Image (cartoon, rainbow, N blue to C red):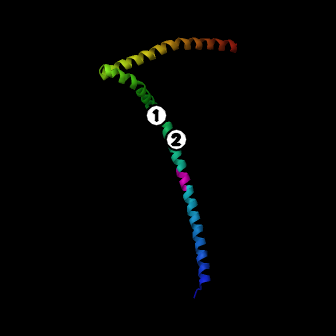
Amino acid sequence: MINSSQFKKVKSIHSTHLSVQNNEKDEKTRWTSLGLKIWLLVGLTAAIIMTKEVLLMAFLSILLAILFSYPLSYLSRLMSRGLSLFFVLIAFLGLMTSVVIGVVPVVSDQASNFTQKLNEVSE
């Protein structure tokens, strides 16, 4: 028959063995979790890289919607919303055209000056 001291000894050995097994399972679980997190990060990064054009278009469309909201709401008090949208778009296209007309000659002159100076330095 087993007395209480022997029972405590067997119980202690058994609990030590179980804790070692649990530590091994915890370590495997930790490494598995870390591996899954790394693969998830790699997958999300690849998805963002593959869809960067779509994300850029979405960002620009949201930006334009925010820029057009104030003048569109102001003009829609005075006239129909469709007509106010037409005028806002015409004004925006006119602004972009004037910026391009103003910037292109300056950039062209600078580029030609740069190429001339580059040719002088290379000779």
Q: What secondary structure do most residues of the magenta stretch adopt?
A: helix
Dividing the image into 4 quarters, which one contains the N terminus?
bottom right
State the image quarter where residue 80 is shown: top left
- Provide the secondary structure element on which disc 1 rests: helix
User: Where 48 falls versus 67 (above or below)?
Assistant: below
Q: Residue at horizontal 46%, vertical 34%?
A: 55
User: Where 46 falls versus 2 (above or below)?
Assistant: above
State the image quarter where residue 19 is shown: bottom right
Q: Which residues, given as a range, are shown in magenta?
A: 32-36
Q: CA distance from mark 2 to mark 1?
A: 13 Å
Residue 112 left/right relative to 123: left
> Viewer-proximal residue, 20 or 80?
80
Q: Residue at horizontal 36%, vertical 18%?
A: 87
* Residue named by callout 1: 55
- Provide the secondary structure element on which disc 2 rests: helix
Q: Does the stretch in magenta take in 47?
A: no
Most distant residue in the bottom direction: 1
Q: Which mark is residue 45?
A: 2
Q: Residue at horizontal 58%, vertical 63%?
A: 24
Find residue 107 and report its horizontal and vertical position in percent: 55, 14
Find residue 21 and report its horizontal and vertical position in percent: 57, 67
**Label 1 Cα neighbours within 10 Å, binned few <14 / some 14-19 / many ≥20:** few
